[in-house]
Amino acid sequence: MKLSTRALGVHFLTATGAVFAMLALLAAAQGAWGTIYLWLVVAFVVDGIDGPLARKYDVQQNAPQFDGVLLDLIIDYLTYVFIPAFALFWSGLLPGWMAWAAIGIITFASALYFSYTAMKTEDKSFLGFPGCWNMAVLVIFVLAPPAWVILGLSLILSVAMFLPWKFIHPVRTARWRAVSLPVALIWTALAAWAAWAEFILPAWADWTLLGTSVYLTLAGIAQQLLPRRG
């Protein structure tokens, strides 16, 4: 198979995320909360695979007729922001004005962040919270905290998008990758289980999901506070 054909196939793989986003949206419209996240987890896995493949087959050089970065951002906004925000609003976890405020904050701040030119750092991490609302909202669905906690978390994470805090990419950030990548895989497995089980997990799984989420959220900040020696 020609290298150009393989590179083009990577673009096609990335574009399947739009299909999974539509399937998730249809599930959300029907109130099938677990099904929403099954599709979003599939999209999450595709997003984790297509990046390494794009670099392996150098899609910019070998399939330049499509802008892979733009395509990825479009898919990510749908699956990381828009669908999770819709699910949060429609779920009833937030009453009245709180629901409207949360989706307004999330979608507005995320739209700005996804066009933020300083999004990436030299070590392949993200500068600011990278708009991973698919992950945040899944944890909210599992733990079902009080409405004021959900709204407060939405505000805090939205502000954190534009603060000089690092957030790791578990695949591309080399530092601590031996820990970060397994943690991300555990999180993904628990997310799929939670979606399959309609967000009812044993207590140990709840705590593990929360713990892995905290690690993935704070590891980059910890790296800033603990710079490399030498």
Image (spheres, grey):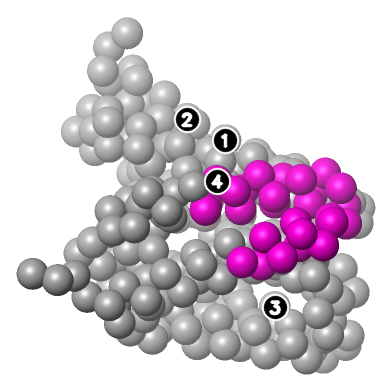
Q: Could you say which quadrant of the image residue 146 lies in?
A: bottom right
- The numbered mark, 4 or 1, whose residue comes first in the sequence reads 1
- The numbered mark, 4 or 3, whose residue comes first in the sequence reads 3
Q: Could you say which quadrant of the image residue 80 lies in?
A: bottom right
Query: Magenta span: helix, strand or loop, mainly?
Result: helix
For discs 4 and 3, the disc positioned in front in the rendered view: 4
Calculate the distance from the C-alpha at mark 2 to the C-alpha at mark 4. Answer: 24 Å
As drawn, is 225 to the left or to the right of 20? left
Tell me the residue at 27%/12% (across/down): 2
Q: Which residue is mark 3?
A: 103
Which mark identifies residue 12? Answer: 2
Calculate the distance from the C-alpha at mark 1 to the C-alpha at mark 3. Answer: 25 Å
Q: Could you say which quadrant of the image residue 94 lies in?
A: bottom right
Tell me the residue at 78%/51% (across/down): 194
Q: Is residue 76 visible?
A: yes
- The numbered mark, 2 or 4, whose residue comes first in the sequence reads 2
Q: Position of residue 82 (x, y in %)?
A: 64, 63
Calculate the distance from the C-alpha at mark 1 to the C-alpha at mark 2. Answer: 7 Å
Residue type, mark 1 in image: Thr
Residue type, mark 4 in image: Leu
Q: Which residues are magenta?
A: 183-211
- The numbered mark, 3 or 2, whose residue comes first in the sequence reads 2
Residue count near mark 2 (Cα–Cα under 10 Å), binned few <14, some 14–19, many ≥20: some
Q: Is there CB contact under 8 Å for labels 1 and 3? A: no
Q: Is there CB contact under 8 Å for labels 1 and 2? A: yes
Q: Is residue 21 visible?
A: no
The local secondary structure at tag 2 comes to helix
Which mark identifies residue 16? Answer: 1
